[in-house]
Image (cartoon, grey):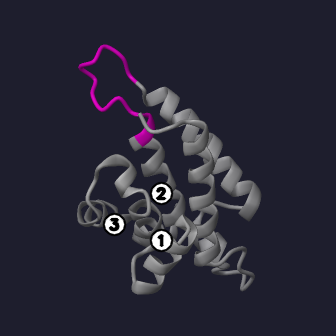
Amino acid sequence: MTRKETALEYHKKGYNCCQAVVCTFCEDFGVSEEEMFRISEGFGFGMGMMEVCGAVSGMTMVLGMQNSIGSLDKGASTKADTYKKVKDCAARFREKNQSIICHELKGIGTDRPLCSCDQCIADAVELTEEYLAANPVK
């Protein structure tokens, strides 16, 4: 099963969009699925407020896990570099789907959805896979 298929299966089971994306990459980072499920629960449905898409939030979490050195005590900060990489990936998601905002993607107030949740999940997984292929897990 591909990662996209896995993520879509998670969503079908009831995982929110963020959980579906981020739990697909747990093993790459040695994080248990249960722990990541719990961490990402509040990020679904646009952080429960239909703001930033949960799939984009999941993608952002994975990028942070890959890029961060995990401490400020190591004499360097990876924050600015991580922010740049997140901004680039979010821009690519926006190019594909015209927005990164949940209520806009769902067409709330316009009755013209831009993208289904399943497509947002699939696109976020694809962009995350492309990012990880170019930036292998440390």
Q: Residue at x 26, y 65 (%)?
A: 38
Image quarter for residue 100? bottom right
Q: Nearer the viewer, residue 113 or 85?
A: 85
Residue at 42 percent across and 60 percent down: it is 22
User: What segment carries the magenta color?
Assistant: 66-77
Examine the rendering and report whether any part of residue 24 can be seen.
yes
Query: Mark 2, residues whose alpha carbon is within 10 Å: few (<14), some, or many (≥20)?
Result: many
Q: Quadrant of residue 104?
A: bottom right
Per the image, the residue denoted by label 2 is 57
Position of residue 131 measured from the top left corner of the image (x, y, whole percent):
59, 44
Label placed on residue 17: 1
Q: Is residue 107 above or below residue 89?
A: below
Label 3 sits on what residue type? Gly
N-terminal of the two: label 3 or label 1? 1
The majority secondary structure of the magenta stretch comes to: loop
- Identify residue for label 3: 42
Is 60 located above or below residue 73 in the figure?
A: below
Residue 122 x/y as whole percent: 61, 68
Question: Closer to the camera, 123 or 32?
Answer: 32
Looking at the rendered structure, the secondary structure element under dot 3 is: helix
Which numbered disc, 2 or 3, marks the residue that appears first in the sequence? 3
The residue depicted at 41 percent of the width and 33 percent of the height is 138
